[in-house]
Structure formats: structure tokens, C-alpha cells
Image (tube, rainbow, N blue to C red):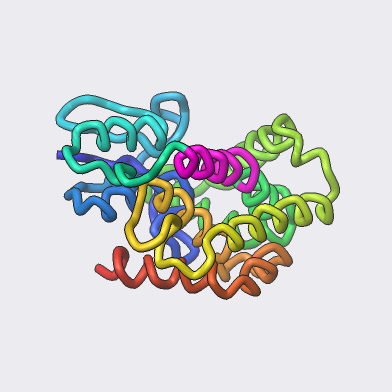
Amino acid sequence: MIKVNKFGPAFGLPDASPFVMKVETYLRLTDQKYETVLADVRKAPRKQLPFVDVDGKVIPDSTEIIDHLEGARVEKLDALLDAKQKAVGLAFKSMLEEHLYFGILFMRWATDDGWTVFEPTLREMLGKLGVPSLMRGMISKSARKQVTARVHTQGLGRKPRTQVVAACTRIVDALADQLGDGPYFWGDKPTTYDATVYAFARGVLCPAFDNELRKHAATKKNLAQYADRLTEKFWKD
């Protein structure tokens, strides 16, 4: 049995975190049954979500999770990819997870308009974990401080908003160009890279955060169609 420990659905997305969405999407791409558990990130291994419990073995980190589960499968999702395709896929995966991710954090946590949307949902999630109502505001404020500090340490948070958006729009443009009109990231069949691409496409297109980055991403029709197509195929349950 696979148990995915996650934050929980939010903003019309399967989870507040693209990394949780990545793992769940991979499981759906490979038709693996799993359960979900709402978890407290403060008590998680490495203080990060998701982590999974696979028959009693706890695995943290979304990439480690997928590597472990994919390693147990006979038919590998990436079997038909050549070395160059895997290299390009890895480059895009890294660009989304190590750069666009921090742009999404910046727009949700560090800006006042983003935080106005994010904070009520964060308080609601804390309530589902059993946190008393009087403590939710204090914990939310502390969490915001920690996340914005992470974005600042990474470097993107040191820039003005216009430069953050500009950097992220270049990534969105590159992703849309790479996607083309194929049903999946690498053509007619899904690969492990689709788990990451889908998660971040949904995240950046999330209409709850109606900022300039989302509006730009929405102009990339093939990106929006890709997200809609995979949602319809793998997330209609």
C-alpha cells in the first residue's frame, strides 16, 4: 500500500504544493493505487511534503519517491527516451522545481495580493490538522516569514516583483515552446517528466491567484490545453 502524506486540496488544485501534485500525478500516470493522508509539514521527514509510506518504508522528497516507485516497475515510463531527451527533460524539470517554484512561492507568499488569497486557506488547512483557532494566525505569520526567507535565500526574493515575473515568464515561454502541440511532454506517451510539468502548469495557471504571471501563462494556449487534457484524463474522479 502506498500512502501519500500531503497538505491537502486548495485553490481548486489537488494540493497546495506542486511537489505533492507531482507525486500523485505520477501515480495516476502509472495507474498505481494509493491513499492520501493530511500531514503536518513540521513533523515530516526533512520538514517537507510530500513523503510516502510504501509498505512501511518511509520515503521523503518527490524525486526520490518517483525514483523508488519507478524502479520497482517492469515497464519504465522513460524507456523510449534517448539520452538527449532525458537530458532535456532533466533540464526542464530542474528549471521548474528550482526556479519557477520559487517564483510561485514569491507570488503567493511574499506579495500582499497573493497572501490575501493564500492565508485564509492556510488557516483552514491548519484547522483540519487540529490546530486551535487562536494559534492559526500566529502559525500562519511564522510560516510566511519562513517561506519568504527561503525565497530570499534562493535569490529570486531579492529582486523586485517585475523582475521575478519577467524571469518566470521566460521559463513559462520555454516550457510552452518545448511542449508544442503534443499530448504529452515527449509526444504521444507520458513519461515521468509529465508529472512535474503538469504539476507546475496547473500551479502557475491557478485562477485563484489572478496575477500577471498567471495571466501571461494563460496566453500560452498549448500549455493551458495540456493542463486541461491531463486533468480530464487523470484527475476526473
In screen coordinates, is 150 left or right of 208? right
**Residue 97: in sight, yes or no?**
yes
Q: Residue at x 36, y 50 (%)?
A: 191
In this picture, which residue range is highlighted in magenta?
Answer: 84-100
In screen coordinates, is 219 left or right of 167? left
Count of labels in the image: 0
Residue 190 figure quarter: bottom left
Nearest the viewer among 56 and 218 is: 218
Residue 12 figure quarter: bottom left
- Residue 60 magenta-drawn? no
- Residue 91 magenta-drawn? yes
Q: Residue at x 39, y 59 (%)?
A: 14
**Residue 135: in sight, yes or no?**
no
Residue 39 image offset from top left, x and y in percent: 36, 40
Nearest the viewer among 53 and 219 is: 219
Which quadrant would the C terminus be assigned to in this image? bottom left
Nearest the viewer among 121 and 168 is: 168
| 94 is higher (above) or lower (below) than 55 | below
Residue 161 image offset from top left, x and y in percent: 81, 53
Residue 4 image offset from top left, x and y in percent: 29, 42
| 102 is higher (above) or lower (below) than 55 | below
Residue 163 image offset from top left, x and y in percent: 83, 51
